[in-house]
Image: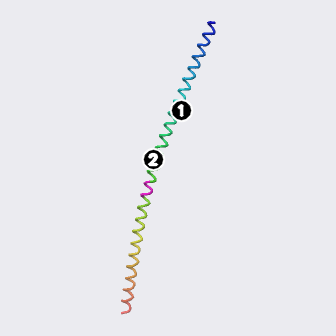
Amino acid sequence: MRKLTIAGIALATAMTAGCATNQAALDEANANAASAEQTASNAMETANQAVSAARSAQQTAEEALAAAQAAQRSADEANERARRMLEQASQK
């Protein structure tokens, strides 16, 4: 009977140790999951900032293009005026 009691205590101790090990593994897995979630959140924030910067750059590029097109139109008009002036001068 004494051997049976000792065996029972040993079994209970082993099971408790196993549960503690399982709990430690669960705690570590939860910590890893939380870390992965934070990393994903940081990556999403970085991606959102990159999208915002890209939109801003696109807006700036569109404004620069519009200014360049306006300058081209002005240059074309100036060239046309100069051409007409040269024609008039050559006819005199």
Marking on residue 85: none
Q: Position of residue 67 (x, y in %)?
A: 39, 68
**Bounds of the magenta segment:** 52-56
Kind of element beneath mark 1: helix
In the rendered structure, which amino acid carries the disc numbered 1?
Answer: Ala
Q: Position of residue 37 (x, y in %)?
A: 49, 40
**Magenta segment, prevailing SS (helix, strand or loop):** helix
In the rendered structure, which amino acid carries the disc numbered 2?
Answer: Glu
**Residue at image location 52% in from the left, 36% down from the top:** 33
Q: Position of residue 5 (x, y in %)?
A: 61, 10
Q: Quadrant of the C terminus?
A: bottom left
Front residue (pair 48, 77):
48
Residue under pointer 2: 45
Whether 28 is drawn above or below 76: the answer is above
Q: Position of residue 9 (x, y in %)?
A: 58, 13
Whether 39 is drawn above or below 68: the answer is above
**Residue at image location 38% in from the left, 90% down from the top:** 90
Residue 18: name its quadrant.
Answer: top right
Q: Earlier in the sequence, mark 1 or mark 2?
A: 1
**Residue at image location 45% in from the left, 47% down from the top:** 45
Residue under pointer 1: 29
Do the residues under discs 1 and 2 have CB atoms within 8 angstroms? no
Q: Is residue 53 magenta?
A: yes
Residue 15: name its quadrant.
Answer: top right
